[in-house]
Image: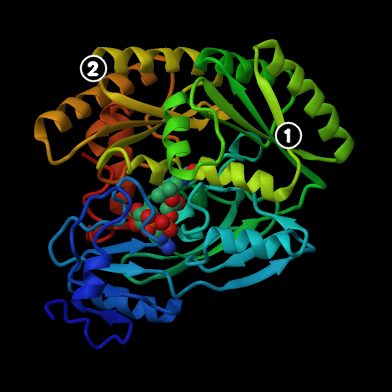
Amino acid sequence: MKTGLSNFPCVSTKPEDILVYGYDSSMLEKQPIAVARPTDVGELVELVRAAYAKNIALIPRGAGTGTVGGSVPVEQSSVVISFERMNRILEIDKENMVAVVEPGVINGVFQRTLKDQGLFYPPDPASLNFSTLGGNVATGAGGPRAVKYGVTRDYVLGLEIVLPDGTVTNTGVRTAKGVVGYDLTRLIVGSEGTLAFVTKITLKILPEPETVVTLVTTFDSISNSAQTVSKIMASGIVPRTLEFMDKNSLKVVESYKHSGLPTSGAMLLIELDGPTFVVNREIENISAICKSFAGEVQIARSEAAAEKLWEARRSISPALYRISTTKINQDIVVPRSSVPEMLLRLDEIAEKTGLFIVNFGHAGDGNIHVNIMTDKSDPEKYNHATAAVDDIFRATLELNGTISGEHGVGLKKKPYIEMELDEVVISLMKHIKRVFDPAGIMNPGKIFP
Ligand SMILES: Cc1cc2nc3c(=O)[nH]c(=O)nc-3n(C[C@H](O)[C@H](O)[C@H](O)COP(=O)(O)OP(=O)(O)OC[C@H]3O[C@@H](n4cnc5c(N)ncnc54)[C@H](O)[C@@H]3O)c2cc1C
């Protein structure tokens, strides 16, 4: 083995391991030279020190559900460090409402463990049943509940990190407040594994809300559904989720799941939570708003009925692969009030280019998942589809949006970051990267063009 790390029991160079750790949900692929699966921080530190001495590139990895190639190696001779074995929930402190976890804990496992104790961790990426909390922290993951509760960043109080030379340190606090020095915790959140390994996470947790109700509302047009979203948000009600699916996503999911969804118009999936009497009042108000835009409202009367709807929503991504081999997936965000305008522009782009574009997402916080369906094996088709990304990002930025709300930059979006960030900001970011990682071994080749 060329890395000289073979004396570490957690390191494997078996071809079957190397193969499966060489890609993520971006469909980009490059095999590492070895894979390490440390079981604790001590084992990780020894390994990182040895790699640092030999200048070996290290790629942190959670569950590989990232959609931008963040955990895919770029350099020859990279070693992937998977956190799957560091997966213990270390502490749930009800008195102070914090939990401490290792990075390999699966989000959904954490959610269910808390729920059994009457507790709640809001960030819920649609990948929650597979993605890790370490990956969620490194990408700053969001999810449907962000509209009311915010994203991962809003729940991370403190971190234990390992720097690329093997130094272990702690950032942040485990208190509700803390302003001593720069906020390195927020810097690490969303840094996509380019600054340090996250080895322990202290999270804020909440009490489970008394009632949760799911409403599904269908509309004859996307424009009516978009106007409903604006009206709901302007009414003072903050739903815990406000998801939309356009007609293309409804069609694709229905042909995959057969959940009884309509296959035209648009659908909103709305969840309300809080004290029962408040939720009941909000159901009435929201129903009235939906009906004023010709929406039909149904209430999921049981947890199983609600879960079926959420299953349909979460299955959009896998369902899309049934219609095309390649999807170019963007997660743009525009100010909420600009969602109707952005959807119109997306329609125009689809019409102008003749591309099949599927839109769905977190309408409540302006986050639209735009999926351009194409075929990578046909270069002409693929280049045509890729060219539309420029138009989409230009329209997003014209409406004061951002080109990524939750997936990050990784490899896939790095050619575009100069559209959003100016030279000064990029230069500051590169300086920060060098301070943490002077040898340039920490997930190299990511984020910066
Ligand atoms: C079907 C599907 C639905 C999705 N829905 C959503 C969604 O609703 N919201 C959303 O935000 N994302 C979503 N995603 C994207 C993805 O699930 C998230 O980005 C998730 O946070 C990645 O977690 P992971 O454990 O799979 O990390 P990976 O994909 O393995 O890694 C992601 C990045 O984090 C870094 N990293 C991982 N662990 C560590 C660590 N311990 N220390 C330092 N760096 C680390 C990696 O180097 C990489 O850059 C979805 C993906 C899929 C496939």
Q: How is the image coloured?
A: rainbow
Query: The disc labelled 1 sits on which kind of residue?
Result: Ile
Where in the figure is residue 43, as x and y percent of width and height? 39, 81
Q: In the image, 262: left or right of 343?
A: right
Q: Secondary structure at mark 2?
A: helix
The number of callouts visible is 2
Q: In the image, 355: left or right of 30?
A: right
- Closer to us: 137 or 250: 250
Where in the figure is residue 398, as x and y percent of width and height? 38, 14
Image quarter of the N terminus: bottom left
Query: The disc labelled 2 sits on which kind of residue?
Result: Thr
Where in the figure is residue 401, as x and y percent of width and height? 43, 23
Does any atom of ligand 1 lie closer than 8 Å to the CB of label 2?
Answer: no
Of labels 2 and 1, earlier in sequence is: 1
Where in the figure is residue 226, as x and y percent of width and height? 55, 17
Q: Is residue 138 visible?
A: no
Q: Secondary structure at mark 1?
A: strand
- Closer to us: 410 or 330: 330
- Give the residue number, with chain letter if any, for mark 2: 353
- Give the residue number, with chain letter if any, for mark 1: 299
The mark found on residue 201 in the picture is none
- Closer to us: 444 or 30: 30
Quarter occupied by residue 64:
bottom left
Quarter occupied by residue 77:
bottom left
